[in-house]
Image (cartoon, rainbow, N blue to C red):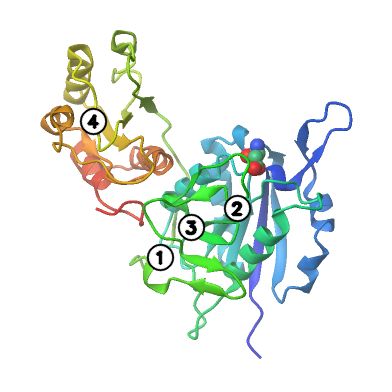
């Protein structure tokens, strides 16, 4: 008989483990032990499940990069003892955490799957049970060589498994709350769980690296018609941020404001990194396609291609910690490191 897989379930909070405050009516996180008691089905899965929790379970709006590092530490400490990891996380910032973990844990040979729910686990119509049980089944799945089928960081929600650094939360009220607009789902759960084997990520790294530092010196600026560039000028300074993500229009376009262009040009001259990411959820940045993006190409703004904003932010925070010169860091930002972009 094949050995049962063992999974570490890591609880961080989120709606899945929340309960209504009887006085205020607000949803608040509660102790993991209570949540565990709500899912007797866990005892019937043929998987060994142990659990861990961050110190204080929180709504994922409270998640900070320090929590990402805490998760890296929990996974590193337990890496050799488990076949996979399932992280229960609020859906609001789940794609940020999934993206960050994909850069901070490089070369994993084991699945790290984030899941959560739109309705608390204690409510009758909860989506949490299916999400949790299937995430555990996927994390426990081995191939004929006894290797994990999934060897990357993923998000599992409402019957679909997505690459974590390709996912985005797209709905605040639908059970189908996530999408991966520029990369197909890695698996779809129906009667069977159907994997798209050709799309699964396989790292060429021999060892798994756990990165325990992050540099949050990154700004994110979303362009909009009429943005007062003069006001933003004082933000686009190397003394304030080491890197800036510009969320631009369409395929990477921006208005030709002289103030904006000169602040970007000076910022790059001073050693700042600028990454161009599209506000559109699907498609990609193509600098130089339109006159309104040629400027970026000329001054050395990096193209984010089809990366999500969540992954771009996490990638910059990771790359800034690397002990390389500026040009090498820029090259790393432009390449596909762990499946986060197509080109
Ligand atoms: N506000 C909640 C959170 O992200 C929403 C959810 O879990 O779905 O923690």
Percent of width and height locating residue 7: 64, 66
Identify the residue at the far bottom of this view: 1
Labels 3, 2: front one: 3
For residue 78, say whether it is visible. Answer: no
Q: Earlier in the sequence, mark 3 or mark 4?
A: 3
Percent of width and height locating residue 225: 32, 19
Q: Is residue 82 toward the left or the right of residue 246 in the image? A: right
**Residue beneath the point at 79% across and 67% down:** 41
Taking the image in four quarters, ligand 1 sits in the one at: top right
Cα separation between marks 3 and 1: 24 Å
Percent of width and height locating residue 100: 46, 46
Q: Is residue 112 above or below residue 264?
A: below
Q: Earlier in the sequence, mark 3 or mark 2?
A: 2
Classed neighbour count for the residue bearing mark 3: other residues with Cα under 10 Å, few (<14), some (14–19), many (≥20):
many
Q: Earlier in the sequence, mark 4 or mark 1?
A: 1
Percent of width and height locating residue 141: 57, 75
The residue under label 3 is 162
Is the C-beta of the residue carrying label 3 under 8 Å from the nearest atom of ligand 1? no
The residue under label 2 is 74
The residue under label 1 is 207
Is the C-beta of the residue carrying label 2 under 8 Å from the nearest atom of ligand 1? no
Q: Earlier in the sequence, mark 3 or mark 1?
A: 3
Which type of secondary structure does the marked residue at label 3 adopt?
strand
Residue contact between numbered discs 3 and 1, judged by CB atoms under 8 Å: no
Residue contact between numbered discs 1 and 2, judged by CB atoms under 8 Å: no
The residue under label 4 is 253
Classed neighbour count for the residue bearing mark 2: other residues with Cα under 10 Å, few (<14), some (14–19), many (≥20):
some
Q: Quadrant of the N terminus?
A: bottom right
- Viewer-proximal residue among 233 and 256: 256
Which type of secondary structure does the marked residue at label 2 adopt?
helix
Classed neighbour count for the residue bearing mark 4: other residues with Cα under 10 Å, few (<14), some (14–19), many (≥20):
many
Labels 4, 2: front one: 4
């Amino acid at each position: 008989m094949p050995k049962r897989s063992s999974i570490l379930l890591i609880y961080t909070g989120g709606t899945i483990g929340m309960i209504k405050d009887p006085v205020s009516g607000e949803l608040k996180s509660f102790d993991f032990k209570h949540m565990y008691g709500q899912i007797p089905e866990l005892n019937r899965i043929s998987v060994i499940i142990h659990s861990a929790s961050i110190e204080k379970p929180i709504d994922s709006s409270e998640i900070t990069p320090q929590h990402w590092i805490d998760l890296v530490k929990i996974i590193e400490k337990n890496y050799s003892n488990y076949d996979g990891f399932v992280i229960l996380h609020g859906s609001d910032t789940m794609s940020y955490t999934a993206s960050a973990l994909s850069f901070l844990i490089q070369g994993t040979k084991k699945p790290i799957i984030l899941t959560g729910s739109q309705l608390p686990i204690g409510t009758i119509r909860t989506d949490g049970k299916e999400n949790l049980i299937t995430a555990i089944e996927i994390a426990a799945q081995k191939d004929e060589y006894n290797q994990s089928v999934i060897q990357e960081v993923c998000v599992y929600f409402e019957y679909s498994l997505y690459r974590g650094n390709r996912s985005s939360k797209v709905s605040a009220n639908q059970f189908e709350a996530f999408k991966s607009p520029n990369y197909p789902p890695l698996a779809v759960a129906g009667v069977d769980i159907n994997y798209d084997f050709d799309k699964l990520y396989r790292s060429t790294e021999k060892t798994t690296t756990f990165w325990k530092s992050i540099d949050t010196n990154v700004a994110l600026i979303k362009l909009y018609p009429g943005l007062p560039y003069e006001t933003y000028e004082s933000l686009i300074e190397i003394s304030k941020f080491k890197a800036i993500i510009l969320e631009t229009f369409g395929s990477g376009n921006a208005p030709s404001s002289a103030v904006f262009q000169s602040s970007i040009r000076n910022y790059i001259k001073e050693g700042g990194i600028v990454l161009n990411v599209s506000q559109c959820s699907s498609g990609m940045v193509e600098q130089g396609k339109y006159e309104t993006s040629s400027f970026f190409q000329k001054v050395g703004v990096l193209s984010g291609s089809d990366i999500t904003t969540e992954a771009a932010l996490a990638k910059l925070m990771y790359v800034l910690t690397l002990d390389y010169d500026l040009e090498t860091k820029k090259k790393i930002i432009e390449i596909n490191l762990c499946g986060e972009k197509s080109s």
